[in-house]
Amino acid sequence: MNALAHRRFLKMNGLGNQITVLDLRGTKHLVSEQEARAIAAEPRARFDQLMVLHDPQAAGTDAFVRIYNVDGTEAGACGNGTRCVAWAMVADPEMGDPARTDLTLQTKAGLLPVKRESETVFTVDMGAPRLAWDEIPLAEPFADTSRFELQIGPIDAPILHSPCAVNMGNPHAVFFVEDPYAYDLEQIGPLLENHPIFPDRANIELAAVTAPDHIVLRVWERGAGITQACGSGACAALVAAVRRELSARKAVVSLPGGDLTIEWRESDGRKDAGHVLMTGAAAFEWDGRLDPALLASAA
């Protein structure tokens, strides 16, 4: 029988971003791409991101978290999913410790300190953005990644052009537009996600800065498609807007699923450095057990 058969999961959402939390602490099992896709096929466990808890790997951390997209590929970061994991680790009756208010989670992208602000609201320190072309990564050198050469559509009248590239644990390309809802993101998203300029593919954001402290955002998420919310995408949008001198360093980012408050702090007087803080809610929906029949084909 598959090691995940009958394993308990939590179904949660972060601003409509569908998150499934699976606790594998105390085991050595690593979820395969096939198993992740099988879990996504279970209606009650379906997710935009699957957050899998493992035993800590680094001293001073509370868990190592592996993140899977709906297509089974791994992601380096998921801000909305991190808030859901934090809720599970402090509030769930089986996996939580209600005495905790602060956590440090480790992912492939690094350490993510989390602070509980209220019963359902958490602030995640998403770390410092990586801005160099080879850190994002891009397939060729660009001295200035705040506006690099990429367009879609006719060369003399492109539909989108000149995005800002940011790595917030995963690569993002942020296009600034007047109205993010005026574009067919279902058609444009996969073309840009898989563009040759992105060797690791990319998350695609359409952002409108409506005020110095407000950004409206839509996201095509790498490996998941159009999503109601994306925490790392909201962070990337704020960083991109600051780099373009379009917004303040703290703003509300409005996504289809709701609002996140994002702040890009300065560090040592450097405006291009400092950690990005993301504050938002996490909501529990239900729990369940993984169906052995679905997992049998993933063995």
Image (cartoon, helix red, strand yellow):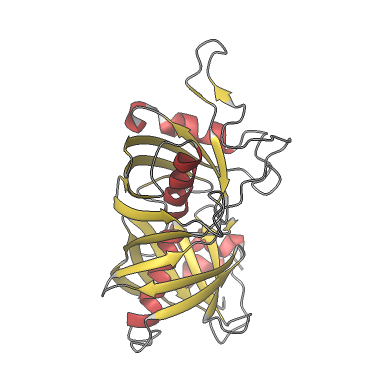
Q: Looking at the image, how many numbered discs can be counted on the residues?
A: 0
- What's the residue at 42%, 32% (across, down)? 185
Question: Considering the image in quadrants, where does the N terminus appear?
Answer: bottom right
Q: Residue furthest right?
A: 140
Q: Is residue 112 visible?
A: yes
- What's the residue at 54%, 13% (across, down)? 154
Q: Residue furthest front?
A: 269
Q: Position of residue 117 (x, y in %)?
A: 31, 72
Residue 32 lies, with reference to residue 161, above or below; the image says below
Q: Position of residue 176 (x, y in %)?
A: 44, 31
Question: Considering the image in quadrants, where does the C terminus appear?
Answer: bottom right
On screen, residue 273 versus residue 214, left or right, reads right
Foreground pick, 65 / 139: 139
Q: Where is residue 139 in the image (x, y as percent from the top left)?
A: 72, 38
Determine which quarter of the picture holds residue 211: top left
Foreground pick, 86 / 43: 86
- What's the residue at 52%, 68% (across, down)? 295
Residue 269 lies, with reference to residue 97, above or below; the image says above
On screen, residue 50 versus residue 144, left or right, reads left
Determine which quarter of the picture holds residue 194: top right
Q: Is residue 291 visible?
A: no
